[in-house]
Image: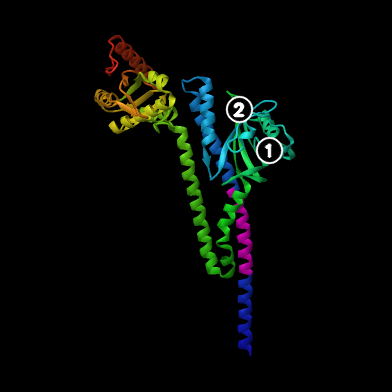
Amino acid sequence: MLVVTHNKNILKLFATFTILALVAYIIAIFLGLGILKEKMFYEKKKEIKNIVDTMYSVIQYIDKKNIPESQKKQEIINLIKNVRFEKNNYFWLFTNSNPPIMIMHPYLPSLNGKPLLDTKFNCASMMEYNHKEYKLENKNLFVAMLEILKHSNEGYVLYKWPKPLKNGISKKAYEKLSFIKLIPKYNWVIGSGIYIDDIEKEYYNVISKYLIVSIIISVVMLILIALIFKKLLLIQKDLRIKQAKIENLAYHDPLTNFLNRTGFYQKFEKALEKNEKFNIIFLDLNNFKQVNDTYGHEVGDKLLEEVAKRIKNSISETISRLGGDEFVILTTKDPKKIINKLQKEISKPYYINGIEIKNISASFGISKYPEDGLNRFELLKTADLRMYKNKNKSKENNESDIITFYNS
């Protein structure tokens, strides 16, 4: 009887311990899930800021192009209009003015060009700037955004807005968190956001697979903890991959996928740090403007893409498109051999949209480190001047189809 009682007491103690351990584990799970939800929200919030910041860098790159102001604006609008991420998330533009006017909304084109003070936009419940949150009571969304810009060039706003669906846009408004940023030169505001229910769906997708089983047996709970961490690592990895893709836009030319000016400068500085000899080759296409004027910018862009392919297939050096039809190459090899190879490829006819283009050539300028300069400004300026001297020399000799180089 004592043994039975003792065994019962042990069973009771074991059962009590198991129940307490299970309750403690369930409490820990719920506490952990609360932290997980908070972290996912924070990561998404940071991600949307990084996405807008990256698009702002791309806008700055476009703004540096040597094209008319109106064309820059249209290129920016077209780019923002067509970019999507995280399924159907998008960018939009409106003016920093009173009243604010919508420049471009990809899913609600009826708003484009119209003032945004209608009471139907009274949907903002929170704004954040300078790391401080301010609660709002159905304030006009765009007025709230302009209020942020009075104190900072960027910030967050929480509000309700229709959601893009496969067959259009929802009639119901969903809670959405957006990040906005001022584009000072044009006095425009760019914004993008993520719907809160999408974050919650992702959150519940993570926990629903493990919660029921984790309550039943402790062994499975331990396995599920490992799976949760694995899932988090996969989410973080996925976020890093997406971030890397978006950041690629900030350092590469979207037309040719060559390095842009920012990306090239980084490579340039690394080459200077090695303190070894290298060469800069400045390349400028001849007769490109004539192609643009005759056939339009669509053909001009395709021509640049074809030229870029030929350059890439001909050499394996660091290549950048600085803008327009100007390219620059950084190499430790003999620049004359590279120019001769490019000369042969670039001069071949092009066939674009049924059009044969024969008169494309290029002018080159070379500068050498350290003989011609000790920094990028000196080296690029020298190569640029020599390229234009070469271009003028070719024009004087009427050498429209011949590419030469000048480096002395």
- The majority secondary structure of the magenta stretch comes to helix
Instruction: Tally the marks.
Output: 2
Nearest the eye: 7 or 56: 56
Q: Nearer the viewer, mark 1 or mark 2?
A: 2
Q: Quadrant of residue 372?
A: top left
* Residue drawn 55% across the image and 61% down it: 209
- Residue 255 makes an appearance in the image: yes
Circle 2 residue? 188
Q: In the orientation shown, which residue stands out farthest toward the front?
A: 354
Horizontal and vertical percent for residue 15?
A: 62, 76
Horizontal and vertical percent for residue 38?
A: 61, 50
Q: Secondary structure at mark 2?
A: strand
Q: Quadrant of residue 263?
A: top left
Compared with 184, 15 (above or below) is below
Mark number for residue 352? none
| Magenta span | 20-40
Horizontal and vertical percent for residue 305?
A: 37, 30
Horizontal and vertical percent for residue 142?
A: 68, 33
Residue 137 lies in the magenta-colored region = no
Q: Amino acid at mark 2?
A: Trp
Q: CA distance from mark 1 to mark 2?
A: 19 Å
Quarter that holds the N terminus: bottom right
As drawn, is 388 to the left or to the right of 118? left
* Residue drawn 38% across the image and 27% down it: 304
Q: Secondary structure at mark 1?
A: strand
Instruction: Specify which label sits upstream in the sequence, 1 or 2.
Output: 1
Q: Is the residue marked by circle 2 packed among few (<14), some (14-19), or many (20+) residues within 10 Å?
A: some
Circle 1 residue? 127
Residue 28 lies in the magenta-colored region = yes
Nearest the eye: 261 or 376: 261
- Residue 367 makes an appearance in the image: no
